[in-house]
Image (cartoon, helix red, strand yellow):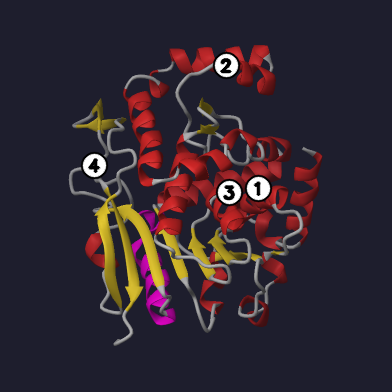
Amino acid sequence: MESIKKNFLFFLKNCKSLKKTKFHKKLDKKHSRLNLKTKNLINEDLDNFLKNFRDSDLHDDLGCPPQITIKHIKIKGLFTALKDYLIRLSSKLYTGNYSESFFYDMDLIYKLGGKKLAEKNPVHLTPMCKTFFFKGKTSFNLRWIRYLYFSTRILKKKLLKSNSTWIDIGSYYGGLQSILKKEVPNCKIILVDFDYQLCKSYLFLKEIFPKTDHILPDQLTIKKINNISNGDIVYLPVEKFNLINLKKIDLITNFFSFGEMTKENFYGYYKKIQKDRPNHIYMSNRFISSPWFEKTYDTSINILNYLSNKFNLIYFDILPLHINLQSNIKVNGKIKKRAPSSNYFEIIMKKNEKK
C-alpha cells in the first residue's frame, strides 16, 4: 500500500487536473457520473480510492462465482475468505446464470488457444486484486477473462510486434496492457482515457513494470507525444488525443467504450483515427448502442458507424464473451432477468493502401 500511495502522489504532481471535477467536454451520463464520483472520492477519501482503485462500487473487476480454497485462506485470511465466500454464495448476482456464463467464458480462453497466456498471468497475483477464482494453474475474474481474450486475439492475429506503436482508447486500470507488455516488451503503448482512469492505470502498471519509462499527462508535450521510445508507456488524457501526429501507428484498439459515447465524442475520435490511418484497428462494441425499446446509452451509434472505406475488413464476428449472461433489467416497468438488449461485435480492420 505504501508504494501505491507514493506512486499516486507522483502521478498527482504530474497531472494537476486530477482533483478538478469539471470536464471540458459534454459527456454521456455514465461517464459524467463516474467522473464526478471518482473525483469526489479522491478529494474526500483518498485511502478508500487507493485501496479499491480497480474494484470499487463505481467500477469493478466484474466479480467471480463463490469459491473458497486453501489458496483463498492463505491470501485473504480465514475470516475474510469465508466472509467473501458466504456473501457471494447468498447473492443471486454471482450464482446461477452468472456462474454458468463465467465458466463458459473461461473455457473460451482455452478454446481460443490462450491457456498458456492465462497460466502466465493469474489474476490473484496482480496489484490490489480482491476477486479471483482458481482453475488449474491460474486464476480469473470476469474482467480479467476479457483482458485474456483480447490479448490472445491480438497475439494470434499478430497485430503487435516488438517495436510496434499501440494506442488503446479506454484502458481502465491497464490490465490488458500488463498482459501484452510481457509478450511484446518493446512495444510503445499509449493509453488514452480520463485522468482518473489514467491514474488507476499508472498505479497498476507501475507496480508491475517499475523500471519502464512511464510518461505522465503533464510531462507530455507535442514533441514528446510523437517521439516516444521503445517500451515506453504514455498516459494521454482524452483532451490531448488530437495532439497525436505519429508517422506510424500499428494498432488502435477500443473495447466497449466507443458505444457508450455521445455521437459527437465518438466521431471526434473516429475521424482522427481515419486520418491517422493505423495499420490495424481492433474494436468490440455493441451492434446497437441504444435500441429503441431500451435506451441503454445516450447515443444512437450502431455497427454501421464503425465501417470506413479507408480500411479493409479482415475479421468480423459476434464477440462470444458473456453471451449467456443475463442481467436484471427493467422491462415494461418491471425488473426481469434477461440477456442484454444488444450483442457485441468483434471487428479487425486493416489499412486500405489504395485510399
Q: Position of residue 262 (x, y in %)?
A: 36, 60
Q: Which residue is mark 1?
A: 204
Q: Residues within 10 Å of mark 1 (few under 14, many from 20)?
A: many
Q: Residues within 10 Å of mark 2 (few under 14, many from 20)?
A: few
Q: Amino acid at mark 1?
A: Phe
Quadrant for the C terminus in the image: bottom left
Q: Which one is nearer the viewer's eye here, 287 or 111?
A: 111
Q: Amino acid at mark 2?
A: Thr
Of the residues under marks 1 and 2, which one precedes in the sequence?
Answer: 2
Of the residues under marks 3 and 2, which one precedes in the sequence?
Answer: 2
* Magenta segment boundaries in residue numbering: 257-276
Name the residue: 25% across, 78% down.
309
Q: Position of residue 245 (x, y in %)?
A: 53, 82
Residue 173 seen:
yes
Q: Secondary structure at mark 1?
A: helix
Q: Residues within 10 Å of mark 3 (few under 14, many from 20)?
A: many
**Marks 4 and 2, how far apart in space?**
36 Å
**Marks 1 and 4, how far apart in space?**
33 Å
Q: Which residue is mark 3?
A: 173
Q: Amino acid at mark 3?
A: Tyr
Q: Which residue is mark 2?
A: 69
Q: Position of residue 151 (x, y in %)?
A: 47, 52
Q: Secondary structure at mark 3?
A: loop
